[in-house]
């Protein structure tokens, strides 16, 4: 998307989007009670805020572009990463959320601190901060900065700075409440624009029947043979759960809207709504790539599939709206990440270790300072990433996530489900286990290539099994080790409506998997 695509009407629409966005942010900030907690929106979020916020945090411009690219080259098989997620979102709703809300926590390191003690909380707090700065902030800014740079023809550091100023404004003024309210507006805009692109594309192809006939038959299959190099079914079935539990159940940026729920019922309805929204990932993000293959099969670079569709199918004005949507994705992800970062540092490190008697006003002040410092660090890292030439670092890091997930998944699952897990076992998994996983990941990604390596998803599963077995052995051997009580879930009457909605979602997902196999 270059500057010559943007006409006067496009610039006007883009400016209008920002005005509306800022107005919603200011309105949400004014609704926040004076000196109330910035981080958890006064625990007032309703189901639609939670659903749109979780989905919005998950959606980035790189995801839009990468999903269309995957659709162009392989069809809907990458939809497994969207549709299979409902299992782990359900795990959050019925296993983790009742415990998180029952423990009345602000952060996930705080929850693990209740289970394993202060040492585990400290390790997890720094682990979470580093993960947020690198994966959620620096790499999201890098991907978004490329888009901003193309349109405005400005340097990367300025692109990143513009995005951070917008996102930090909401985080510092209104905290999670402002982020959540603006996410609703932004994700509705995303659905409208992406659905329009899909519908217009289908019209140009000649309808669903014509599309099916113009692409290979295996483009409509979710489970490919194990001989398939990119998407073998067994590594996906076994390996994705390791990333799924980490991402949907234990990542502060993803889970924070649930921690801010008005009550457990709203949290479970919100996660259910996220599950329904994840169904849209395939028709809104992946299907445009399939349509692009049918319309422009000679396209040399699949990464250009999304913008090729926009450039060729959308009239003046809609291009500006698309860019507004891409910016919306960025602001949503960065805003959620900045809020999570300031929450973890302020509550788990500053208040817990240095100022336990801090007033709410002082805590909010520190949170705003942390937001600014995190933003500066993220800009420096973004410029550093941009200076590395000849390496698709973003794609490399997506693979690295498969090696980051096993320690967190092992600690949270055993910590919740096995009473005998000790503090020593958790700390060894989070320190030595993480180092082991990263060494394996470095060897896999940058070491000598060999057919002996399994698929990286299978490798993620095997690493998890090794760490889980290690934790069991250490816990059994550590006879006098610290074993705190597992925080008990909220004991509230289960809502029949919530259970019915989750049952419907499960039936729909099973139906989709049967239909597309």
Image: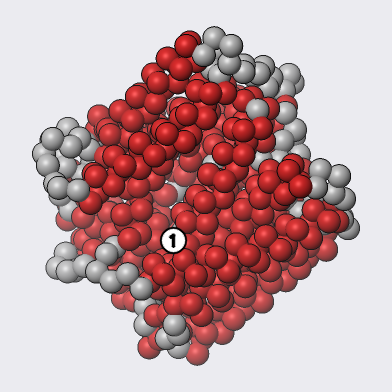
On the image, the x and y values in percent for residue 82 come to: 40, 43
The residue lying at 25 percent from left, 29 percent from top is 234
The residue lying at 17 percent from left, 69 percent from top is 300
State the image quarter where residue 113 is shown: top right
Q: Residues within 10 Å of mark 1 (few under 14, many from 20)?
A: many
The residue lying at 83 percent from left, 63 percent from top is 30
Q: Is residue 446 shown to the viewer in this render? A: yes
377 to 3, vertically: above or below: above
278 to 191, vertically: above or below: above
72 to 262, vertically: above or below: below
On the image, the x and y values in percent for residue 461 come to: 33, 30
State the image quarter where residue 26 is shown: bottom right
Indicate the secondary structure of the residue bearing disc 1: helix
> Is 116 placed left or right of 195 in the picture?
right
Figure quadrant of the C terminus = top left
- Please state which of residues 160 and 46 is positioned toward the viewer in this rendering: 160
327 to 100, vertically: above or below: below
On the image, the x and y values in percent for residue 442 come to: 28, 47
> Is 396 placed left or right of 406 in the picture?
left
> Is 414 placed left or right of 448 in the picture?
right
The residue lying at 46 percent from left, 66 percent from top is 381
Quickly name the residue at label 1. Answer: 139
> Is 153 placed left or right of 190 in the picture?
left
Q: Is residue 322 shown to the viewer in this render? A: no
Figure quadrant of the N terminus = bottom left
Image label count? 1
Q: How is the image coloured?
A: secondary structure
On the image, the x and y values in percent for residue 107 come to: 66, 40
- Please state which of residues 5 and 143 is positioned toward the viewer in this rendering: 143
């Amino acid at each position: 998307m270059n500057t010559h695509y943007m006409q006067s009407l496009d610039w006007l629409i883009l400016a209008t989007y920002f005005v509306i966005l800022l107005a919603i942010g200011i309105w949400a900030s004014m609704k926040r009670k004076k000196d109330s907690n910035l981080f958890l929106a006064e625990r007032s979020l309703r189901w639609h805020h939670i659903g749109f916020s979780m989905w919005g945090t998950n959606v980035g411009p790189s995801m839009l572009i990468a999903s269309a690219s995957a659709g162009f080259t392989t069809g809907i098989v990458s939809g497994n990463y969207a549709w299979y997620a409902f299992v782990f979102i359900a795990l959050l709703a019925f296993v983790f959320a009742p415990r998180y809300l029952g423990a009345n926590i602000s952060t996930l390191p705080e929850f693990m601190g209740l289970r394993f003690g202060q040492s585990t909380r400290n390790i997890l707090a720094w682990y979470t901060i580093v993960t947020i700065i690198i994966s959620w902030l620096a790499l999201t800014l890098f991907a978004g900065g490329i888009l901003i740079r193309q349109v405005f023809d400005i340097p990367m550091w300025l692109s990143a700075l513009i995005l951070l100023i917008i996102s930090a404004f909401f985080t510092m003024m209104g905290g999670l409440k402002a982020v959540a309210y603006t996410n609703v507006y932004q994700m509705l805009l995303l659905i409208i624009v992406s659905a329009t692109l899909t519908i217009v594309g289908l019209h140009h192809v000649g309808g669903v029947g014509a599309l099916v006939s113009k692409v290979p038959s295996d483009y409509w299959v979710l489970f490919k043979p194990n001989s398939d190099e990119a998407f073998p079914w067994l590594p996906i079935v076994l390996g994705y759960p390791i990333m799924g539990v980490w991402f949907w159940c234990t990542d502060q940026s993803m889970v924070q809207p649930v921690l801010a729920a008005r009550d457990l019922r709203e949290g479970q309805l919100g996660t259910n709504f996220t599950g329904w929204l994840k169904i849209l990932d395939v028709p809104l993000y992946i299907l445009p790539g399939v349509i692009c293959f049918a319309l422009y099969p000679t396209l040399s670079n699949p990464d250009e599939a999304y913008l090729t569709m926009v450039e060729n199918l959308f009239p003046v004005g809609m291009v500006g709206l698309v860019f507004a949507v891409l910016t919306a994705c960025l602001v949503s992800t960065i805003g959620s990440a900045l809020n999570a970062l300031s929450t973890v540092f302020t509550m788990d490190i500053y208040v817990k270790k240095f100022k336990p008697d801090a007033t709410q006003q002082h805590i909010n002040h520190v949170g705003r300072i942390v937001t600014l410092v995190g933003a500066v660090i993220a800009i420096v890292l973004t410029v550093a990433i941009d200076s590395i030439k000849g390496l698709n670092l973003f794609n490399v890091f997506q693979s690295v996530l498969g090696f980051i997930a096993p320690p967190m998944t092992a600690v949270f699952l055993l910590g919740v489900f096995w009473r005998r897990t000790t503090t020593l076992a958790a700390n060894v998994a989070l320190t030595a286990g993480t180092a082991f996983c990263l060494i394996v990941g470095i060897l896999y990604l940058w070491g000598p290539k060999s057919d002996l390596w399994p698929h990286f998803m299978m490798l993620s599963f095997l690493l998890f099994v090794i760490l889980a077995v290690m934790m069991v052995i250490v816990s059994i051997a550590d006879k006098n080790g610290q074993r705190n009580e597992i925080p008990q879930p909220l004991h509230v009457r289960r809502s029949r409506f919530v259970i019915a909605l989750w049952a419907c979602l499960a039936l729909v997902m099973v139906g989709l998997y049967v239909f597309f196999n």
